Amino acid sequence: MLQRQIWILAATVFAFFALTARAEYLPRAERVSDDVYALVGPLGQRSADNDGLNANFGFIVTPAGVILIDSGASRRGAEKIAAAIGKVTDKPVRWVVNTGSQDHRWLGNDYFAGKGAEVIALARTAATQAEYAAQHMEGMKRFLGERMQGTQALPAPKAIAGDSATLELGGETLMLAYTNAHFPGDAWIWLPKRGVLFSGDLVYVDRILGVLPWSSVKNGQRAFQALVQLKPAHIVPGHGRVCDLAQAQRETGDYYDFLTGKVGAAAREMEPLTATLDRYQDMPQFRHLYNYDELHRANMSRAFTEFESQ
Ligand SMILES: [Zn+2]
């Protein structure tokens, strides 16, 4: 009898691993507003199973074709995005607009350009894509291995000058503006007729935002304050589920305020770094956010460095 139970247990464990090992992530379109959809990616790291689609994307169906916001991290990722769009509409992707220069925002550009789409970004976004292209391709190869095959880095060929721009595409109005927070050249896309904001990597919900060596917390706070003025009805964040302004405020805006206010003040007053990090290690209002344990201390440290040098 015991032997039989052990056998059943072993079979169950084996079946569990067999199932989870094959859990490939396929994006699914989620309606945000009429004709506006989000593809909400998983919160974890880039992997062969998610093809680097661990971020959010979106699209707008217009009478003239589809506007895609961000194109995924690889050719295969772009194909998965195209398949998700194909379940909603037969219309072709006519335009791709990039909100940023981090791998998953744009390494699928070449795939959509090959299908006839025009790829558009603000000039600094496109320039940063070109600058980081080799580094991001290498990084993605480490995560995805041979699944990166066929991926070509194509910085947005249509680069728009100026600090902001208004595009009319297929009757839809898109307003682009720099946020320069997570990466230099990051931008958001505001749909004024819909009250929908695609924030790019300015807003993170459900998981804690990441401050990278090239991020600017100061710009993040400033951009978030401008975002509040738009009074968006729906925000498609860079990462995490589609949210309202109140959640974005709690999980991103308040965190930027904390980093600039508390950590920034300590840096400007030349308090010691380690003591500052220790003092703010435990922040109950942000603890529930995914990745808190991995990122919060490093985020504070980078914020400290940014304010120290000013
Ligand atoms: Zn991102």
Image (spheres, rainbow, N blue to C red):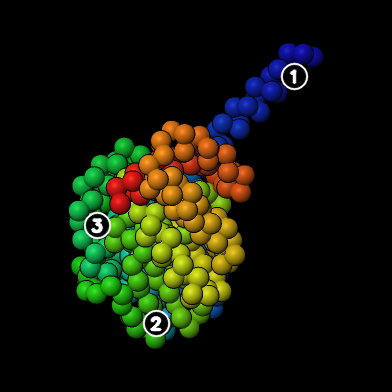
Q: Looking at numbered disc 3 in the image, what kind of residue is underneath it?
A: Gln
- Give the image location of residue 183, x and y in percent: 32, 55
Q: Looking at numbered disc 2 in the image, what kind of residue is underneath it?
A: Thr
Mark nearest the camera among 1 and 2 is: 2
**Mark 3 or mark 1, which is nearer the start of the sequence?**
1
Q: Residue at x 75, y 19 (%)?
A: 5
With respect to residue 132, does 47 lie above or below?
above
| Near-viewer residue (93 or 178) | 178
Query: Is 290 placed left or right of 177 in the picture?
Result: right
**Residue indicated by mark 3:** 129
SS at circle 3: helix
Residue 98: tell me if it is visible.
yes
Mark nearest the camera among 1 and 3 is: 3
- Give the image location of residue 2, x and y in percent: 77, 13
SS at circle 1: helix
Q: State how far apart marks 2 and 3 are (Cα).
A: 24 Å
The residue carrying pointer 2 sits among few (fewer than 14), some (14 to 19) or many (20 or more) residues within 10 Å by Cα, namely some
Q: Residue at x 56, y 67 (%)?
A: 245
Query: Is 301 placed left or right of 139 in the picture?
Result: right
Q: Looking at numbered disc 1 in the image, what kind of residue is underneath it?
A: Gln
**Residue indicated by mark 1:** 5
**Residue indicated by mark 2:** 173
- Asked whether mark 3 lies closer than 8 Å to ligand 1, one says no
Q: State how far apart marks 1 and 2 are (Cα).
A: 63 Å
- Give the image location of residue 310, x and y in percent: 30, 52
| Near-viewer residue (164 or 156) | 164
